[in-house]
Image: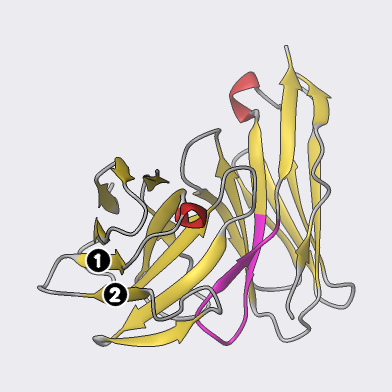
């Protein structure tokens, strides 16, 4: 069964540094998403991406964050000037279509900011 | 602000019994609803999706939706120890994001 793949599985970074989290969505999917889950808390929407542009973003997704689809397969989340509170699991998801299609999640990247 | 509410649990159910998980949502225009299962330290895994009022069955799982009451539930029949996990209720409106509840921890007692 096709999967969303994310790399790395764990990223440790010094506060203030930039990180790039990578995702390969399911190949025939057209909608891409990033979510985060702080330890012990609920999964929170960050951003959705369709047709090479952001379609929606949450209050969390401020100027510190950016997304890119640099080629036909990868979808990346860049976090600039990381802060301690950015430590979380970051999940990439993809969907074959917009609402009401379900989203399928990757295994996540655990980001630890020191 | 749209909210999805779930009892955090833990909900303890004997093996072989029916587990009943409940969820309410605040946004009347929500169109689609999902149940995800999340094992500790793992990603959400889609279990069921439901879009219309009534019941939808898939194997041991039955999702129930009542839009008038803004209520979604998940029944797990013949509960197994491997069903022990956190179950996330989620809704998706006309916009492009999924709103998750905090999840209900389910513990199946062997």
Instruction: Let me know if residue B76 appears in the view.
Output: no
Q: Which residues are magenta?
A: B89-101
Residue at horizontal 26 percent and vertical 50 percent from the top:
A5
Q: Residue under mark 1: which chain is it in? A: A
Of B68 and A91, the residue lying toward us:
A91
Up-down: is A41 above or below B96? above
Scheme of colours in the image:
secondary structure
Q: Residue under mark 2: which chain is it in? A: A
Of A56 and B69, the residue lying toward us:
A56
Up-down: is A55 above or below B85? below
Give whichever of discs 2 and 1 has the lower sequence position.
2
Q: Classify the position of the C terminus of chain A by image quarter.
A: top left
Q: CA distance from mark 2 to mark 1?
A: 5 Å
Where is residue A37 shown, x and y percent of the image?
53, 53
Structural crowding at the residue carrying mark 1, measured as other residues with C-alpha within 10 Å and reported as few (<14), some (14–19) or many (≥20): many
Of B37 and A92, the residue lying toward us:
A92
Where is residue B44 shown, x and y percent of the image?
51, 48
Q: Quadrant of residue B2?
A: bottom right
Residue at horizontal 73 percent and vertical 23 percent from the top:
B108
Instruction: Let me know if residue A114 appears in the view.
Output: yes
Please give the label number shown on residue A110: none
Identify residue for label 2. A67
Please give the label number shown on residue A76: 1
Where is residue A71 shown, x and y percent of the image?
10, 73
Structural crowding at the residue carrying mark 2, measured as other residues with C-alpha within 10 Å and reported as few (<14), some (14–19) or many (≥20): many
């Amino acid at each position: 069964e096709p999967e969303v793949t994310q790399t790395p599985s764990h990223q440790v970074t010094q506060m203030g540094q930039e990180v790039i989290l990578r995702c390969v969505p399911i190949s025939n999917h057209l909608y891409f998403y990033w979510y985060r889950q702080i330890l012990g808390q609920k999964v929170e929407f960050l951003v959705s991406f369709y047709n090479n542009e952001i379609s929606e973003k949450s209050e969390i997704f401020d100027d510190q964050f950016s997304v890119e689809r640099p080629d036909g397969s990868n979808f990346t989340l860049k976090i600039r000037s990381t802060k301690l509170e950015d430590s979380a699991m970051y999940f990439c998801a993809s969907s074959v279509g917009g609402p009401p299609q379900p989203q399928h999640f990757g295994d996540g990247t655990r980001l630890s900011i020191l | 602000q749209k909210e999805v509410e779930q009892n955090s649990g833990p909900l303890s159910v004997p093996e072989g019994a029916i587990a009943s998980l409940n969820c309410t949502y605040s946004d009347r225009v929500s169109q689609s609803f999902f149940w995800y299962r999340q094992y500790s330290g793992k990603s959400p895994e889609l279990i069921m999706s439901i879009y219309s009022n009534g019941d939808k069955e898939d194997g041991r799982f039955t999702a129930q939706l009542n839009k008038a009451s803004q209520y979604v539930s998940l029944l797990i029949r013949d509960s197994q120890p491997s069903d022990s996990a956190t179950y996330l209720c989620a809704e998706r409106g006309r916009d492009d994001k999924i709103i998750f509840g905090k999840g209900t921890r389910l513990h199946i007692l062997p």
